[in-house]
Amino acid sequence: MALSKLDAIIADAVASQKIPGVVVAVSDRKGLIYEGAAGVRALGRSEPMTLDSLFWIASMTKAITSTAALQCVERGQLSLDAPAAEILPQLGNARVLEGFDAAGAPKLRAPKRPVTLRHLLAHTAGFGYEFGSPDIKRYAEVTKLPGFTACTKAGLETPLLFDPGERWEYGINIDYAGLMIEAATGLSLGGYFAEHITGPLGMTSTSFRPSDALRAKRVGIHARSRDGNLSPMIVDLPEDPEVEMGGSGLFGTPADYLRFTRMILNGGEVEGRRYLSPASIALMSTNQIGDLPCCSFETAMPEWVNSVPAVPGMPMHWGLGFSINGVAFPGGRAANSLSWAGIANTYYWIDPTNGITAAVGTQILPFFDAHVIEMLGEIEAAVYAAN
């Protein structure tokens, strides 16, 4: 597969000053077939972007946590459909937010049914994020809860937005799945990953707590202003988090991440080691939410995320850890490919039909940056044109 056109695409994106720096990695079922880097790690600094530059991959953590949860299900340590409070008692205290009274205090009630691990992995439990829900944002302001980047137990104490199973809502669900893994195994989430996923896969740059050597390669985060200009932005991510956030806490590199996605691409097995059964891979990669609409939302915090619109003619579903496109992307990934992203504009997809997986790393806020999305489309088209 000739992928030299990718060099020009990422070089042009940087030369146009639309993107400070980018790393792209592409793999087939056997291993990496392309790596490229362009630009700088941060505006105002001299370090060039390199293939081993470290990104906050944020919600790309979710697929790894979901894999860990299903490993625990296979071993009988967790159940998809038992009340999650049997493992994590605080989930038994979850309440549904029904609005706010005249004094501004939250109005809460008990849910009609318990939260399950399946709800959490499918984002149907009822939890949201403050950047995607005005009600969660208001609740956090009223109760003075820290935001999700604080990586604290208190920051997870948000209410449900609806009764479990009744809607799809993107939120802190998989952070709770991570806590369930810790409770079931007696390991920290990072310790579990190192023993069962990232360690065996050789993902040496992927961590909740990067070493000083890795942090020295970290890519700076940039804010896109309304006029389109970029400036360095400080995002306070603790070096020693109270909670290793299973939904958003990992740092890593695109090539490292493809070690994980190649395992998914190969049906749960890679280089002679099986990580998940074919049945678990099928659960992860098939629609688990029926006809519920998913994968688009209106922003409640435009400095963090742009609104993500539904695409006409492109039905989207959710499995257990991944979004699933119901039809093929024109000139790109096949129907039923798996994908997701990180809030600072990191992206990946896994296309089992064509045997291709790719990851793209930038560090720009807000999420769903128009220039990154344009570049991502060009990258995908070039990958499939060369196939």
Image (cartoon, rainbow, N blue to C red):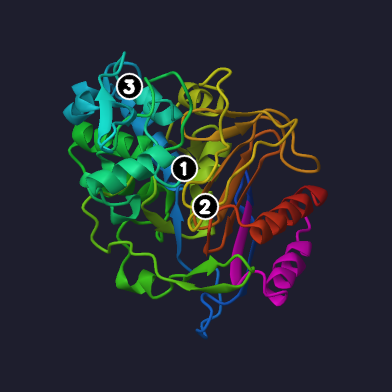
Residue bearing the label numbered 2: 305
Amino acid type, callout 1: Gly
Residue 139 in the image: x percent, y percent?
Answer: 31, 41
Q: Is the Cβ of the residue at disc 3 closer than 8 Å to that at disc 1?
A: no
The one nearer the camera, 278 or 67, is 67
- Residue 116's disc is 3
Q: Quadrant of residue 89?
A: top left
Q: Is the Cβ of the residue at disc 1 closer than 8 Å to that at disc 2?
A: yes
Amino acid type, callout 2: Val
What residue is shown at x 39% (from left), y 38% (from top)?
Answer: 135
Instruction: For residue 255, say whether it is visible.
Output: yes
Q: Mark 1 or mark 2: name the one nearer the start of the chain.
A: 1
Task: Report helix, strand or loop for mark 2.
Answer: loop
Residue 27 in the image: x percent, y percent?
Answer: 63, 50
- 299 in relation to 278, above or below: below
What residue is shown at x 27% (from left), y 51% (from top)?
Answer: 146
Q: Mark 3 or mark 1: name the one nearer the start of the chain.
A: 3
The residue segment tinted magenta is 1-26
Q: Is residue 10 magenta?
A: yes
- Residue 29's disc is none
Residue bearing the label numbered 1: 132
Dot 2 crowding, Cα within 10 Å, few <14, some 14–19, many 20+: many
What residue is shown at x 74% (from left), y 52% (from top)?
Answer: 383
Q: Is the Cβ of the residue at disc 2 closer than 8 Å to that at disc 3?
A: no
Q: Is residue 366 magenta?
A: no
Dot 3 crowding, Cα within 10 Å, few <14, some 14–19, many 20+: many
Per the model, the C-alpha gap separating discs 2 and 3 is 28 Å
**47 sits left or right of 30 in the view:** left
Dot 1 crowding, Cα within 10 Å, few <14, some 14–19, many 20+: many
Q: Which is closer to the viewer, label 3 or label 1?
A: 1
